[in-house]
Amino acid sequence: MAKKKPFLVAMSGGSGSGKSTLAEALLDHLEPGQAVLFGEDAYYYPMSHYGEPTTKEEWTELVAGINYDAPRSKEADRLVKDLRALKAGETIQQPIYDYERHDRSEKTRQIKSAPILILEGIHALSFPKISSLIDLSVYVDTPDDLRLARRIRRDVTERGRSLESVLQQYLGTVRAAHYQWTYPAKFEADLVIADEGLPAYGNVRPTEEAIERMIAPVLARLQNCGAI
């Protein structure tokens, strides 16, 4: 009997939608070694793609001009190449993005293929080049106010940014980019998961019952497809 190809689950939703929490919960509910999780955010272009700033001022200006919420900020061709390799059962060296430096790290993350591949990110369902590789598309539907609250908590607490800079970026690019590139996937996804308000960041963790309800449709679909 021929060995089944890895099954690709792509999870998307707006920034702060809780898609990462859902993806991690799915990984935890599957058997060890049955699935691997990798983020699409790892594929942000390195700063060398935009130029070679020589001063701190030039670097700051260059970073400020990049729309990180647009698909063009990511190296789609490398993402496609790595997805094809994983679906072929191969091991990849995934790039690592350093958010503090706003640049790609020189280090990479080795990812071995697994029966179930979980791709998550705001553009996981936005690249036409990878649509043919996706076996199950999932969109996490979350109200704008909840997503903004989570983004503020994450960026201020975990990434050391000021509240003003977070709001400026949200109003300047994040919200518009969401409705232009991410939100349309809701109407084409195989599954749309209604967010229950899981606290994706901070010390308060979602209840196990809430997580179970959100991942139940995904697990059911994987079972129906024979992936698990």
Image: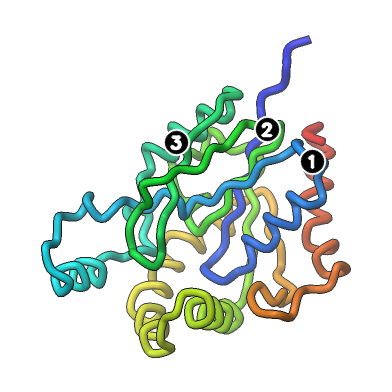
**Residue beneath disc 3:** 80
Comparing 2 with 165, the one in front is 165
Q: Residue 172 appears at what percent x and percent y?
A: 33, 79
Whether residue 15 sits left or right of residue 172 in the image: it is right
Q: Is residue 70 above or below residue 93?
A: below
Q: Which quadrant would residue 171 be assigned to in this image?
A: bottom left
Specify the label residue 114 is tagged with. 2
| Alpha carbon separation for disc pair 3 and 2 | 17 Å
User: In the rendered view of the protein, which quadrant contains the C terminus?
Assistant: top right
Mark 3 touches mark 2? (CB < 8 Å): no
Q: Position of residue 80 (x, y in %)?
A: 44, 36
Q: Nearer the viewer, residue 167 or 142?
A: 167
Residue position for label 1 = 32
Secondary structure found at label 2: loop
What residue lies at 56% left-to-right and 30% top-to-bottom?
86
First in sequence, mark 3 or 1: give its number: 1
- Badge 3: how crowded within 10 Å, few (<14), some, or many (20+)? some
Give the spatial CA distance, label 2 vs label 1.
10 Å
Residue beneath the point at 31% across and 65% down: 67
- Residue type at numbered disc 2: Ala
Callout 2 environment at 10 Å: few (<14), some (14 to 19), or many (20+)? many
Alpha carbon separation for disc pair 3 and 1: 25 Å
Direction right: furthest residue: 209
Image position of 159 with respect to 20: above or below: below
- Identify the secondary structure beneath mark 3: helix
- Give the label, 3 or 1, closer to the camera: 1
